[in-house]
Amino acid sequence: MPLDRKAVPNDLRAFWMPFTSNRQFKSAPRMLVSAKDMHYTTADGRQILDGTAGLWCCNAGHCRPKITEAVQAQVAELDYAPAFQMGHPLAFELANRIVDIAPDGIDHVFYCNSGSEAVDTALKIALAYHRARGDAARTRLIGRERGYHGVGFGGISVGGIVNNRRFFGSLLTGVDHLPHTHLPENAFTKGQPENGANLADELERIVALHGADTIAAVIVEPMAGSTGVLLPPKGYLQRLRDITKKHGILLIFDEVITGFGRLGSPFAAQHFGVVPDMITCAKGLTNGVIPMGAVLTSAAIHDAFMQGPEHVIELFHGYTYSGNPVACAAGIATLETYQDEGLLTRAAQLESHWQEALHSLKGLPNVIDIRNMGLIGAVELQGIDGEPGKRGFDAFVRAYEAGILIRVTGDIIAMSPPLIISEAQIDELIGKLAEVLKSTA
Ligand SMILES: Cc1ncc(COP(=O)(O)O)c(C=O)c1O
């Protein structure tokens, strides 16, 4: 008998859910059972308009035929191949395709399985790169307040979200943080804020404190997503690039969210015209279908490792599933889908409609800021005194009941719909959110 996947399981205890209020969820489950294009279907048969591309990852929408078919065919042809000292053609093909759409100067791809692994991989490459060049004292890593770089020890050490750090011990040593770029005077700015490029100069202060010759790398999200959509002020990223270059410090852009078209260019690096030394990506790389992440590096970084006897492994790092064949097939079909449908630049076409729709929420109860760029938007709500996050969470649950999927970080609502969204669906998403905000105390 075929499995009835739509039935709600009657025992939810065993699964300890990630980044979830488990007890609340299990008392009133929000169960998704299928998806197509812009919509999820719930266990109780309702259609939910996806305002978040799953978790910032399904950039081409859901269950897209080319990707589904590629995965089905690949799993039947070559399910797995060892990742160390062996290869298979798709891993090379996908790497070439990624480099084709990456910024000029980014030439190599190191595979992993998630954004967190991509970040830890990039930090390790940065340390080993300096060592390979005889600059072994460069061991410090610089992140940024309110940055999110996944949940590995490297990522939470350079990250700047207090709850992701405070429960987990002393983390990596030798880490410092830039200030975040979220300034009150930029509230309700449409697109990139004017004020705050000078915050990049704080890097000079950190360099003066520690000495440039002790610093390996700076890692930032070009646009900080998970912390509640914090945009880089105009000129900020270029200044970071100038200062890092001046001091021989590597610059890593964490593009796990911004990669693959979110801002209207394949990568944020191209959108802002600032090329880092490494880019971390995941999520949209396979449209979220099969877990996969990658670190993209300059030739200079890669080539620094290509020395010594040829039989010796150059980088002692990698994962059992690095470049998994099924993930590679998903990645190739995803990039083809993006290309076929012009999705890597579609956010630029939709941006003004998205921006106007989003900013129409100004003036609704408790809305204290609205921010947007590409197909990303945030609506910040005034927190309830003594109950931080409660108003945001209530809005999230009501939105789900109203038929839209949004995300909340504390009291900040974030949206990042699939890049296939139509203007009418943008209006529907924002219209339903407006009703939710009007009814949220
Ligand atoms: C910028 C950034 N880096 C890293 C990660 C971690 O990715 P993953 O959850 O795939 O480990 C995320 C996830 O949202 C992210 O937004």
Image (cartoon, rainbow, N blue to C red):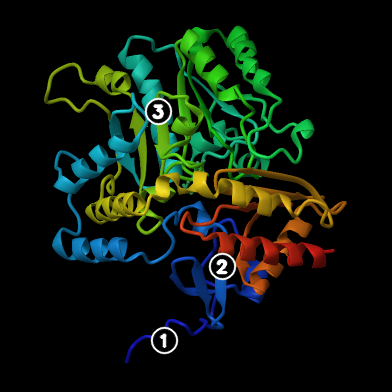
Q: Between marks 3 and 2, how big is the CA–CA gap?
A: 34 Å
Residue farthest along the right direction in this orientation:
385
Mark before the other along the chain sequence, 2 or 1: 1
Left or right: residue 154 compared with residue 321: right
Q: Is residue 21 visible?
A: no
The residue sitting at 35% across, 49% down in the picture is 292
| Amino acid at dot 2 | Leu
Q: Between marks 2 and 1, how big is the CA–CA gap?
A: 23 Å
- In terms of image quadrants, where is residue 310? top left
Percent x, y of residue 66: 28, 62
Look at the picture and state if 193 lies above or below 338.
Answer: above
- In terms of image quadrants, where is residue 122? top left
Look at the picture and state if 197 lies above or below 389.
Answer: above
Disc 3 packing (10 Å; few <14; some 14–19; many ≥20): many
Percent x, y of residue 195: 71, 25
Mark before the other along the chain sequence, 1 or 3: 1
Look at the picture and state if 5 lies above or below 398.
Answer: below
Residue 142, numbered label: none
Residue 4, numbered label: 1
Left or right: residue 138 compared with residue 163: left
Question: What residue does disc 3 label?
Answer: 278
Question: What residue does disc 2 label?
Answer: 49
Q: Considering depth in this image, is 141 or 302 the residue closer to the camera?
A: 302
- Badges 3 and 2: C-beta atoms under 8 Å apart? no
Label 3 beta carbon within 8 A of ligand 1? no
Considering the numbered disc 1 on the image, is that residue within a helix, a strand or a loop?
Answer: loop
| Amino acid at dot 1 | Asp
Look at the picture and state if 116 lies above or below 237.
Answer: below
